[in-house]
Amino acid sequence: MTKPDLRFLLAHPAHFLALGFGSGLAPRAPGTFGTLAAFPLFVLWLWLGLPEGLMLLLTAFLFVAGVPICARAGRSLGAHDPGAIVWDEIVAMLLVLIYAPPTAAGWLLAFALFRLFDIVKPWPIRVVDARVGGGLGVMLDDLFAAVFALAVQAAVWRVLA
């Protein structure tokens, strides 16, 4: 496997995106840094006043685009889903943020839940991660982690309401 660096990041647009604009180059916990990279994009969407439906549509587009983006970067790195590829975390976190209360507590809970499910990979996330290859596999396990995070997030806010 090739170790990604700044040269790799800038060698191709797919590398730049797959590595989360550079956040995937973090020497430790690149997935966490990639997840954090979703926040400025989401704040931009809020600042632009995008409605929920448009945010969902954009997130779906970024997911579909992520399949070839992550596949290209993975092939270039010589690994299926190396930690440096964080586009999947960014896109999945955007989905979770769309339904999080726009408060510090809401965003912190969304972040913590998504990271928990992305790291622990309970069933069926672990199965998807192990059995689905290519760019789709990279993107799909994080989508499942986002769905788990969304379910728990909804339950927490329902109980606290």
Image (cartoon, grey):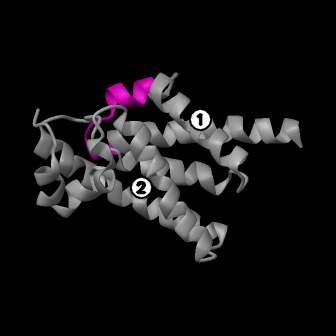
Of badges 2 and 1, nearer the viewer stands 1
Q: Position of residue 100 (x, y in %)?
A: 68, 50
Inspect the image, locate mark 2, and give the three-letter code of the amino acid beneath it.
Phe
How far is disc 2 from disc 1 in space, using C-alphas? 21 Å
Mark 2, residue position: 63
Q: Residue furthest right?
A: 161
Q: Position of residue 121 (x, y in %)?
A: 48, 25
Within 10 Å of the Cα at label 2, are there few (<14), some (14-19), or many (20+) other Cα atoms? many
Q: Quadrant of residue 83?
A: top left
Is residue 126 visible in the rendered image? The answer is yes
Main SS, magenta residues = helix
Q: Position of residue 156 (x, y in %)?
A: 78, 36
> Dividing the image into 4 quarters, which one contains the C terminus?
top right
Q: Secondary structure at mark 1?
A: helix
Inspect the image, locate mark 1, and give the three-letter code of the amino acid beneath it.
Ala
Q: Position of residue 154 (x, y in %)?
A: 74, 42
On the picture, is 156 further left or further right than 92?
right
At horizontal 39% and vertical 38% (from top left) the residue drawn is 31
Q: Residue furthest bottom?
A: 48
Decide which of 141, 28 is in the foreground and name it: 28
Q: Secondary structure at mark 2?
A: helix
On the picture, is 40 further left or further right than 87?
right
- Residue 2 higher or lower than 15, as above or below: above
Mark 1, residue position: 112
At horizontal 57% and vertical 63% (from top left) the residue drawn is 56
